[in-house]
Amino acid sequence: MPFEAVSLPGKPTAIQFGAGNIGRGFIGAVLSQAGFHVVFADVQEKIVQSLNENGHYDVHILNGETQIETIGPVSAVMSTDLVAIENIAREPLSIITTAVGPNILPRLAKPIAQIIRTRMEEGMGPINIVACENLQNATDKLREAIENELSDEKERLYMQDNIGFAICSVDRIVPPFSSENILDVGVEPFFEWTVDSNSLKKTDPDVVIDGMHATNNLDAYVQRKLFTLNTGHAITAYLGFLKKKATILDAISDGSIRDTVSQALHESGTALIAKHHPFFSHEEHEEYINKTLKRFSNHNLRDEVSRVGREPLRKLRKGDRLLGPVEMCRERNLEHDTLLLGVAAALLFYPTGIHEDKEANEIHDRIQQEGIEEVVSDLTGWSKDDVDSQKIIQEYSRLKSEY
């Protein structure tokens, strides 16, 4: 697909890698509303073509009222079209963002390396790349992949001096949305986009984005979001699956599931406050937990438990939403039995049919072949006779017999 110049008089340009629901419904929307002309880069030809033909799309705010925000002007290129990417790099490009998923992120190394190379050749100044992915080390992963793509030391030195790799935390629920227009997207009203001010390069002109909050204590924001929203979302999904609930709303509307999720979030919250106090207080975090549970209870979000629970192996990685808060509690000798219950529920997530999940299948097959003790020990890194290993196994057996 040919690329045409995208700069508009008086509008800085932002390139957003990933034109999926998060890219369009969250990051691209915030950038557009902050005054940028957003160029989406994606591999889906139909989406790219539609964005170029329409030049705008609608974001539906799912809050029970008819609220539609039209996002534009926007355009798009294929992220594999390096000529188009090079042309964008020559424009007054102000920021680069991504929302493609942690596993896809390294594939952006080639087009972003082309942008860096072109800016070096043109003598352009600093620019920031913000990887908006649900992974704590997403920015490091992207930087390493780009370094491997750059061919010589001169390019790497230019990147070191002129490219800011900004660490951030992103928070907005963007469920599947049905519309006649493939570009339309539905989102919850709440969003939070927080960026580490220490990882930003100073640009000329310096870019200020309404809707993006900069802080010098991002670690607190990242862990608060990951170990509250994502932890609660995952446990709600896994318990909902066991109780044959179709959606997160159905699951959190079950009193016993809501109570369990609330208890798990208070366990992780106690550890978060212990680590990050006085950055936020008990009262502030209690409000954040209540807001999170309220978000799960939004009657306008029809988010399937099979979607939220997918890729359980990724969610069971050390430091992620399930084992991360457990480890934080273990380090401080804090109560975490309900969080261990969440881990056990994740091991029983096994959707079939159209919702079949490759990682869930792998866990199921490994438990069948190796035994639950071996799998728990491998995933957690704890010994088989560790007290918490035994608690997970006991909860796994109990849940399996009950459901």
Image (cartoon, rainbow, N blue to C red):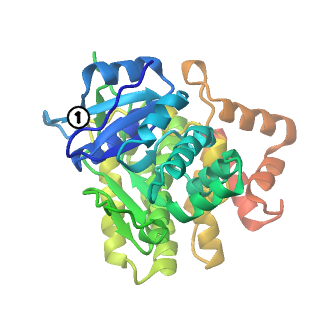
Q: Residue at x 23, y 45 (%)?
A: 11
Q: Is residue 387 left or right of residue 110?
A: right
Query: Which of the image's four quarters has the C terminus?
Result: top right
Name above or below for residue 329 compared with residue 142: below
Q: Is residue 371 left or right of residue 71?
A: right
Q: Residues within 10 Å of mark 1 (few under 14, many from 20)?
A: many
Q: Residue at x 69, y 55 (%)?
A: 392
Tell which residue pokes out farthest to the front in this image: 122
- Residue 103 visible at all: no
| Viewer-proximal residue among 287 and 158 | 158
| Viewer-proximal residue among 251 and 211 | 211
| Viewer-proximal residue among 80 and 230 | 80
Name above or below for residue 239 compared with residue 270: above
- Name which residue type carries label 1: Gly
Image coordinates of residue 170 in percent, x first then y, are: 41, 53
* Secondary structure beneath label 1: loop
